[in-house]
Amino acid sequence: MLKTVEIYTDGACSGNPGKGGWCAILMYGGREKVLSGGEAETTNNRMEVYAAIAGLNALKEKCKVALYSDSAYLVNAIEQHWLEGWKRNDFRTADKKPVKNKDLWLELSALLDKHDVTFIKVKGHADNENNNRCDKYARAEISKL
């Protein structure tokens, strides 16, 4: 039986592009692990996807994961099967333009093959305590740059 893990993620940017931060909070069996980091020149969308990658990368074995994010970009890419379409179309959009952040989508795709992940969209900057904590950590990373 797979372990069930909750992962809350968020990305933030000061300027877009600009300084960016990300955070992933992993919860399992009453314990939690907080991961965070930043980049000097990035975008909000890159930080959102990177937070999910960092959270999934931290898992040491195959898990059942509920991944919570306030990013429509991230959640819709999975739940509305955009990523599947991009892979079929050699990472081109419907209007034949290159998909942005291909490197991150490839990395995330490989991690999704390893785990049983469900993406759950949460409202940003609202009443989800763990999403708000992620935002706080991600913004703190920006201030370190």
Image: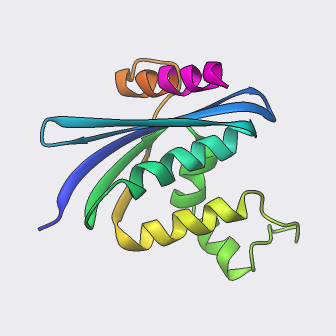
- Residue 131: name its quadrant: top left
Is 108 rendered above or below residue 47? below
Q: Tell me the residue at 75%/72% (across/down).
A: 91
Is 116 rendered above or below residue 4? below
Residue lying farthest to the front in this orientation: 144
> Does residue 41 belong to the magenta stretch?
no
Image quarter in which the N terminus is found: bottom left
Q: Tell me the residue at 45%/21% (across/down).
A: 132
Which x, y percent locates residue 69?
Answer: 48, 39
- Residue 94: name its quadrant: bottom right
Q: Tell me the residue at 44%/67% (across/down).
A: 112
> Does residue 142 belong to the magenta stretch?
yes
- Magenta range: 136-145
- Residue 70 in view: no
Relative depth, front residue between 103 and 8: 103
Image quarter in which the C terminus is found: top right
